[in-house]
Image (tube, coloured by chain):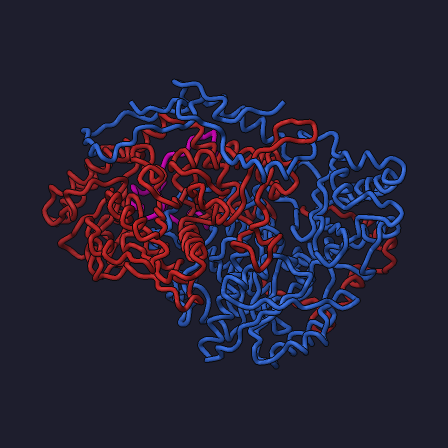
Chain colours: A blue, B red
C-alpha cells in the first residue's frame, strides 16, 4: 500500500511538540504583515516517527546491501563518523564565532587541507565547495581568472573527453566556455592525435577524469598533461575516481593543475540520498592565490609551549567566495576521522582492494557480457547490457531485474560512449562472497534473458513499487501534495 | 576494519584474475610515480580516533557552553530529538540519489513532501529538491533571471540589506558575464527601510530585483511598492526568506514574489560551524521549467500504484550536459529530510509558536538593551524578526570581548561588512533564549559601562 503523505495524515488540532510559553511581555506585530493562513500538517510525534520509519523501509541503502554504482563509490560509511560529527564541540559551533573560540574546528580543517594536499600531491586545498560539481565550478572559475589575469582573453575553449561526467560540460558552460568534445582512442584513453589537433591558443584547459569513467587509467597521462601545458592550457582533474589511486598515484606529481575530491565518494562520508556532498579543490603552486576566499591557515606560529593559532587567510587573486561560511564542515569532520583511521597504509589498502574487487568481477563477468575495452581495469569497469542474439533486452531490463535479486543496479547508460552501458564499481568494502553472489545473479539474468525475457521486461517484481511511468510524471506534473484552499490552516 | 579481505580471499581472487600479486594490477601507472611515500600521521584505531576527535571538539567553546546572540544567517533553534533519530536510519543516510525509483520511494516521498512544505510555507507554486545553501540559491536566482531574458536585460539589482555572503557568492558565480551589472548594494543607495533610492534604480534593463525578508538586519519591510514597480518594468523579483519568520509573516508568494529562496538551516539543522545547511528555492508556475536542480513528481507504477520519480530531468546536467540549466548534481538530500521531519513535528502550531517566541523575545531584548547607557536601537520604528541592530558608543570589539569573558557570544559585528555601520552589533534571539539570559546580557553590558 502507498504510504499517505504528511498532509493526508494531518488532523487539525494534533501537536508533535510544544514550546514553553513566552516569559516576556507581548509586542504586537503590525497588522499589515500578519499571515492569515499557515497550511502545515498537524500530527503527533509518534505519527511522524512511524511515517518516516515506514517510508525509510522503501529505500535501498548501503546498510542493506551491495550498491555497485559505477563512478559513485558507494563504500561503507563508518558509524564512528556519525558519532564524532555530532559531538557538541562541532555540531553546536556557530560559524560566526571568533576564531579563538573555535581553534578545534580550525585545526581540524587545516589538518584536513594538509592531508588532502599530501594524498594528491598539491600545494593548497580549499574545503569550501559543497559537492563535486561545485568543486568543478571552482576549477573552471580559476581557469577563467588565470587566463584573464594573463591577458589571454582568446582562451575560450575547454576540452572534455567524450567519456566525461555530465557535470564537466555543465560547469564549463557556466563560465561561458565553449565545450569541445575530445574523442577516446580504441583503448579508452584520450585520443592523443585529436588532442594535439585541438591544442592552439584558444585552449583554456582540459577536464580530465583519470581513471576515466570506463574505469581505465589513461596510459598517456604524462603526454596528455604535457601537450595541454605546451599549448598554454591548464589541466583540471576530476577526482571522482580517486578511490583507485589512494596511496598509489598522486595526480599532482604529473603536473595536473587543479583537482576536486568527492569526500562523499572517496572518503566515506554518506551520500544521504543525494547529498550533502563535499568537494574540496586542490591546486598546484602557481594557482594557490586563486583559491576561494577564505582558506584556513596558521595566523600565528606556535612554539614549544603554545599551539599555533589558526584562522582565516585571504588568497591574493581569489576567485571570491563560493558558498556561505566554511563549506560542509560536518563532512570535513567525517573525512578527517576516516583518513586518521587509515593512515598511509590504510589508504593504499583501500585502493588496492577496490581495484582487486573490480578486476575480479570483470574477469568473472566478461564471458557472459561483452567487455568493450578488454583491459585491466581500476576500481570499476563497463559492460554492454545487451546481446545481439536477444534483441529485445536492454541494459535497463538487466538493471531492473537485479533489484529482484536484492542488489542495487549498476550505473546504466553511462558513459555515453558504450552502447547500453552497465558501469560496475564494487568498492573495497565488499566481501568476496557478496561479489560472487552478484556475479551469480548477473549470470542467471543473462540466462533468463534467453529463456524467459518477460521476467526482465516486467522487472522488478519484488520491490515496493514496480517500474514507474516517467512520461506520465513529466506530462501530468504533480510536484506538491494537494492542499486545497479549504484545507485548515487559519491562524488564531 | 573497512576492507574484509582475508589472505586466502586475496590469493583466490588474484589467481582468478591471472596475476601474481596486487601490485601487478597497477602496471599502467607510470612506474616513477607509483606508490608515493605519503607523509601522514600514523593510523588510529577507532578507539583512539574517538578520543582524538573528542579532544579536538573540546578545544572549542560553542553555543552549548556559551550564551549566544549570534545569528546573521545561522540560528540556534531547538531541534526535537526525533529529527536526528530518524536521520540516523541507514535506509536514509546511506542511500544514493534516487535515480532508481523502485527502490528509492522513501527518499522520493520525503523530497515530494519537502517540496510541498516549502510551497506552503512561502506561498509559492513549485519548489525544487534543494541547493547547497542560501548563498548559492541566491546565485541560482540570478542565473535563472538572466537566462529568462536570454541575457538581454543587463542589470540585476540586489539590495544592500541582502546577506553580504549571498552578494559575494552571486558576484563570484557571475564574474565571467562581463556585460551583466550587479548593482543596487552600494553605500550610496544605502539601507534605508523606505527603499526609495533602490526602487528608483529599477528600469527596463533590469532582469531581477533581489531583496531579503526579513532583511539581513532583521527588519520586516513592506515590499509591496517595490514589487509593483519591478513588475511594471517587467523584471522578476526574488525574495530571500527567513523560513522561521514564515510562521508569522505574510509569505512572499502572497506579495507577488516570482522567486522565493533562502537558507533552511533553521529548519532542524545543527549549526555545525556553517554546514552542511540547506538552500531552498521555489518559484511561481510560470518559471517552473527554468528551475535548476532536481524535482520529484507523482506518477503510477506498472500496477497503477501511486509512486514518486525524479521528473523533468531533461533540464539537468546528466542529460543536457553543457546546455543544462545548472551544473548541480549532489544537492542537500539529507538536509531536506531533516527540514521535512522538523516541519512535520512542529506542524502549524509549533511553527507559529517558535516564530512568535523569536519575535517576542527579540523585542524584549531590544527594549531592555536600549535602556542601557551607551547602547541604542538603530531603527526604532521598523518592526523586526529574530534579530536587530544596536549602536554601541564603545568600539564593538571591546564590547564583544567583554561579553565573551562572561561566556556570552554577543552578536555579529556589522562593521566587518558595512563601513557605515562601524560599532554596530546585530543580535539574534531565538526561542532558546530565556528572559534571564537577556537580563544577564544587560547586566554584563551595564557592568561594562561602569567598569
Residue B97 position by quadrant: top right
From the viewer's perspective, is residue B295 above or below residue A233?
above
Give the dominant element type of the magenta stretch: helix, strand or loop: loop
Q: Position of residue A427 (x, y in %)?
A: 70, 50
Question: What segment is highlighted magenta in the picture?
Answer: B56-84
Report the residue at 66% width, 50% height from top. A73
Q: Position of residue A409 (x, y in %)?
A: 72, 43
Q: Quadrant of residue A121?
A: bottom right
Q: Residue at position x 60%, y 78% from top?
A: A229
Along the line of sight, the residue nearer the viewer: B394 or A179: A179
User: Which residue is painted at 57% across and 33% down in the image?
Assistant: B298
Is B91 inside the magenta-drawn segment? Answer: no
Whether residue A242 is visible, yes or no, is no
Rendering coords of residue B276 (x, y %): 47, 47
Q: Is residue A378 above or below residue A433?
A: below
Q: Residue at x 66, y 58 (%)?
A: A241
| Left or right of A30, for residue A171 | right
Q: Is residue A370 visible?
A: yes
Percent x, y for residue A7? 47, 25
Q: Is residue A391 above or below residue A473?
A: below
Question: Relative to the observer, which residue lies in front, B322 or B265?
Answer: B322
Amino acid at each position: 500500500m502507498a504510504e499517505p503523505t504528511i498532509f493526508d495524515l494531518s488532523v487539525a488540532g494534533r501537536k508533535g511538540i510544544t514550546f514553553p510559553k513566552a516569559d516576556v511581555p507581548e509586542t504586537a506585530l503590525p497588522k499589515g504583515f500578519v499571515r492569515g493562513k499557515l497550511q502545515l500538517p498537524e500530527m503527533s510525534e509518534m505519527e511522524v516517527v512511524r511515517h518516516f520509519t515506514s517510508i525509510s523501509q522503501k529505500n535501498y541503502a548501503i546498510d542493506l546491501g551491495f550498491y555497485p554504482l559505477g563512478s559513485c563509490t558507494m563504500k561503507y560509511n563508518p558509524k564512528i563518523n556519525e558519532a564524532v560529527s555530532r559531538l557538541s564541540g562541532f555540531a553546536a559551533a556557530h560559524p560566526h564565532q571568533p576564531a579563538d573560540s573555535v581553534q578545534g574546528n580550525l585545526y581540524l580543517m587545516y589538518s584536513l587541507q594538509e592531508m588532502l594536499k599530501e594524498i594528491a600531491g598539491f600545494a593548497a586545498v580549499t574545503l569550501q565547495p559543497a559537492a563535486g560539481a561545485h568543486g568543478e565550478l571552482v576549477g573552471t572559475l580559476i581557469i577563467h581568472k588565470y587566463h584573464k589575469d594573463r591577458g589571454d582573453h582568446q582562451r575560450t575553449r575547454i576540452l572534455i573527453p567524450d567519456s566525461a561526467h555530465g557535470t564537466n560540460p555543465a560547469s564549463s558552460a557556466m563560465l561561458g566556455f565553449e565545450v569541445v568534445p575530445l574523442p577516446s582512442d580504441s583503448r579508452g584513453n584520450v585520443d592523443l592525435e585529436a588532442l594535439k589537433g585541438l591544442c592552439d591558443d584558444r585552449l583554456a584547459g582540459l577536464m580530465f577524469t583519470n581513471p576515466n569513467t570506463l574505469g581505465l587509467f589513461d596510459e598517456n597521462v604524462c603526454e596528455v598533461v604535457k601537450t595541454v601545458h605546451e599549448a598554454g592550457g591548464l589541466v583540471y582533474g576530476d577526482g571522482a575516481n580517486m578511490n583507485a589511486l589512494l596511496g598509489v598515484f598522486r595526480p599532482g606529481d604529473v603536473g595536473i593543475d587543479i583537482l576536486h575530491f568527492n569526500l562523499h565518494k572517496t572518503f566515506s562520508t554518506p551520500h544521504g540520498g543525494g547529498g550533502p556532498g563535499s568537494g574540496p579543490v586542490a591546486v598546484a603552486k602557481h594557482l594557490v592565490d586563486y583559491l576561494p576566499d577564505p582558506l584556513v591557515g596558521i595566523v600565528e606560529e606556535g612554539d614549544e609551549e603554545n599551539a599555533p593559532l589558526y584562522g582565516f587567510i585571504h588568497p591574493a587573486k581569489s576567485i571570491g567566495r563560493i558558498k556561505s561560511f566554511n563549506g560542509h564542515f560536518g563532512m570535513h569532520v567525517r573525512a578527517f576521522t576516516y583518513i586518521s583511521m587509515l593512515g598511509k597504509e590504510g589508504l593504499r589498502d583501500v585502493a588496492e582492494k577496490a581495484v582487486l574487487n573490480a578486476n575480479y568481477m570483470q574477469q568473472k563477468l566478461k564471458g557472459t557480457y561483452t567487455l568493450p575495452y578488454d583491459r585491466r581495469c581500476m576500481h570499476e569497469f563497463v559492460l554492454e547490457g545487451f546481446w545481439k542474439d536477444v534483441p529485445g533486452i536492454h541494459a535497463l531490463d538487466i538493471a531492473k531485474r537485479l533489484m529482484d535479486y536484492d542488489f542495487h543496479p549498476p550505473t546504466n547508460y553511462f558513459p555515453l560512449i558504450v552502447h547500453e552501458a552497465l558501469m560496475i564499481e564494487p568498492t573495497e568494502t565488499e566481501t568476496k562472497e557478496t561479489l560472487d553472489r552478484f556475479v551469480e545473479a548477473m549470470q542467471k539474468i543473462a540466462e533468463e534473458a534467453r529463456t524467459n525475457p518477460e521476467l526482465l521486461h516486467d522487472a522488478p517484481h519484488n520491490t515496493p513499487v514496480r517500474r514507474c511511468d516517467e512520461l506520465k510524471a513529466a506530462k501530468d506534473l504533480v510536484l506538491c501534495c494537494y492542499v486545497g484552499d479549504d484545507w485548515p490552516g487559519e491562524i488564531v | 576494519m573497512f576492507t574484509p579481505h582475508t589472505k586466502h580471499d586475496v590469493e583466490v581472487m588474484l589467481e582468478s584474475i591471472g596475476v601474481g600479486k596486487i601490485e601487478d594490477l597497477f602496471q599502467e601507472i607510470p612506474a616513477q610515480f607509483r606508490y608515493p611515500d605519503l607523509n601522514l600521521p600514523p593510523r588510529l584505531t577507532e578507539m583512539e580516533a574517538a578520543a582524538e576527535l573528542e579532544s579536538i571538539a573540546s578545544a572549542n567553546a560553542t553555543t552549548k557552553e556559551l550564551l549566544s546572540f549570534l545569528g546573521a544567517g545561522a540560528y540556534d533553534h531547538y531541534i526535537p530529538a526525533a529529527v536526528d533519530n530518524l536521520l540516523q536510519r541507514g535506509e536514509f543516510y546511506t542511500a544514493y540519489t534516487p535515480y532508481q525509483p523502485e527502490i528509492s520511494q522513501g527518499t522520493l516521498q520525503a523530497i515530494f513532501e519537502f517540496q510541498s512544505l516549502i510551497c506552503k510555507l512561502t506561498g509559492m507554486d513549485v519548489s525544487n529538491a534543494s541547493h547547497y545553501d542560501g548563498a548559492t540559491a541566491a546565485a541560482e536566482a540570478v542565473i535563472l533571471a538572466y537566462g529568462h531574458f536570454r541575457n538581454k536585460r543587463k542589470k540585476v539589482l540586489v539590495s544592500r540589506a541582502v546577506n553580504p555572503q549571498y552578494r559575494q557568492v552571486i558576484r563570484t558565480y557571475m564574474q565571467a558575464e562581463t556585460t551583466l551589472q550587479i548593482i543596487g548594494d552600494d553605500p550610496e543607495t544605502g539601507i534605508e527601510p523606505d527603499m526609495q533610492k533602490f526602487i528608483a534604480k529599477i528600469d527596463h534593463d533590469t532582469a531581477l530585483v533581489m531583496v531579503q525578508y526579513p532583511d539581513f538586519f532583521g527588519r520586516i519591510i513592506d515590499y509591496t511598492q517595490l514589487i509593483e514597480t519591478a513588475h511594471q518594468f517587467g523584471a522578476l523579483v526574488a525574495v530571500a526568506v527567513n523560513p522561521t519568520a514564515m510562521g508569522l509573516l505574510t509569505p512572499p508568494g502572497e506579495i507577488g514574489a516570482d522567486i522565493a529562496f533562502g537558507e533552511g538551516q533553521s529548519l532542524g539543522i545543527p549549526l555545525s560551524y556553517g554546514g552542511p545547511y540547506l538552500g531552498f528555492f521555489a518559484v511561481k508556475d510560470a518559471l517552473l521549467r527554468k528551475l535548476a536542480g532536481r524535482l520529484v513528481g507523482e506518477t503510477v507504477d506498472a500496477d497503477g500504484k501511486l509512486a514518486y520519480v525524479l521528473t523533468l530531468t531533461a533540464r539537468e546536467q546528466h542529460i543536457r550536459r553543457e546546455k543544462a540549466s545548472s551544473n548541480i548534481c549532489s544537492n542537500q538530500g539529507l538536509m531536506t529530510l531533516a527540514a521535512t521531519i522538523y516541519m512535520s513535528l512542529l506542524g502549524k502550531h509549533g511553527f507559529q509558536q517558535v516564530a512568535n517566541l523569536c519575535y517576542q523575545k527579540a523585542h524584549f531584548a531590544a527594549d531592555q538593551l536600549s535602556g542601557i547607557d551607551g547602547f541604542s536601537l538603530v531603527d526604532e520604528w521598523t518592526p523586526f524578526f529574530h534579530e536587530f541592530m544596536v549602536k554601541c558608543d564603545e568600539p564593538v570589539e571591546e564590547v564583544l570581548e567583554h561579553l565573551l569573558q562572561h561566556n556570552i557570544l554577543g552578536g555579529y559585528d556589522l562593521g566587518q561588512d558595512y563601513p557605515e555601520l562601524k560599532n554596530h552589533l546585530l543580535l539574534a534571539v531565538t526561542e532558546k533564549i530565556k528572559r534571564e539570559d537577556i537580563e544577564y546580557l544587560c547586566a554584563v553590558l551595564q557592568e561594562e559601562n561602569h567598569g
